[in-house]
Image: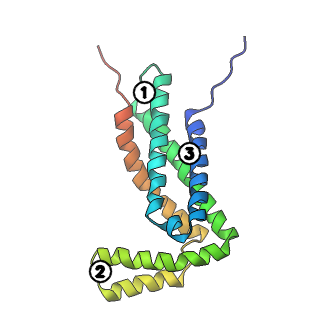
C-alpha cells in the first residue's frame, strides 16, 4: 500500500498567496502609479490575511477540528511571510524591468509622502526635509524594499497572533 504525502498547508496556501500577490502586483501595475502605490495597495493585506486565515481553518479541519495556538501561528504567519516575500520581490523585479514606470512613481510617492506628513501635522521644514530624503535616494531599491518588508513582517506577526488565537485551541484537560 502506497501512501501519498499531502503537501504542507503552509506551502500550499503560501503558494496560493504568492500567486494572488503576483496577480495583484500586475493588476496595480496596469492600473498606473496611483494604483500601484496608492490606497488600493491595502487590499493586498486584506487578501493575504484572508488566505492565511483560511489556511489556519483548513489545518484545524484537517486535524479533527483541533489546532494548537503555536501550530496555528506557524501556519498563519508562514503563509503571510511567503505571500509578502513574493509580492515584494515581484514588485522589485517589475520596477527593475520597467524603469519608465519606476520613474512615473516618484512624483506620486513624493505627493503621498507630503500628504502623510501633513496629516500628522509635521512642520513645513520637516516635510521638506523628508521629501528631499525621498528624492535623494531610491525608495525602490532592493535594500529599501527588503527593509520595508521587515517592517511589514512585524505588523503581520501581530496580526497573526490574533488570528492564531481565534483559530487555535488549547487541549481540554479532563
Mark nearest the camera among 1 and 2 is 2
For this view, does 166 lie left or right of residue 49? left
The answer, for residue 89, to whether it is visible in the render is no
Give the residue at mark 3.
Answer: 17
Q: Are marks 1 and 3 in contact (CB under 8 Å)?
A: no
Image coordinates of residue 10 in percent, x first then y, are: 55, 37
Image coordinates of residue 106 in percent, x first then y, are: 53, 78
For this view, does 77 lie left or right of residue 119? right
10 Å crowding of disc 1: few (<14), some (14-19), many (20+): many
Badge 1 or badge 2: first in the primary sequence? 1
Image disc number at residue 122: 2
For this view, does 139 lie left or right of residue 45? right
Give the residue at mark 1.
Answer: 67
Q: Is residue 5 above or below residue 15?
A: above
Secondary structure at badge 2 equals loop
- Residue lying furthest front in this view? 31
Amino acid at each position: 500500500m502506497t501512501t501519498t504525502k499531502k503537501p504542507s498547508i503552509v506551502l500550499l496556501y503560501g503558494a496560493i498567496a504568492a500567486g494572488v500577490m503576483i496577480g495583484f502586483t500586475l493588476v496595480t501595475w496596469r492600473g498606473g502609479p496611483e494604483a500601484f502605490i496608492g490606497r488600493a495597495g491595502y487590499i493586498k493585506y486584506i487578501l493575504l490575511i484572508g488566505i492565511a486565515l483560511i489556511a489556519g481553518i483548513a489545518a484545524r479541519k484537517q486535524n479533527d477540528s483541533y489546532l494548537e495556538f503555536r501550530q496555528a501561528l506557524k501556519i498563519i504567519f508562514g503563509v503571510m511571510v511567503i505571500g509578502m516575500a513574493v509580492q515584494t520581490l515581484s514588485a522589485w523585479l517589475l520596477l527593475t524591468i520597467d524603469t519608465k514606470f519606476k520613474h512615473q512613481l516618484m512624483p506620486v510617492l513624493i505627493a503621498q509622502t507630503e500628504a502623510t506628513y501633513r496629516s500628522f501635522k509635521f512642520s513645513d521644514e520637516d516635510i521638506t526635509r523628508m521629501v528631499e530624503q525621498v528624492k535623494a535616494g531610491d525608495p525602490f531599491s532592493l535594500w529599501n524594499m527588503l527593509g520595508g518588508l521587515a517592517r511589514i513582517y512585524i505588523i503581520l506577526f501581530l496580526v497573526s497572533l490574533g488570528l492564531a488565537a481565534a483559530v487555535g485551541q488549547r487541549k481540554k484537560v479532563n
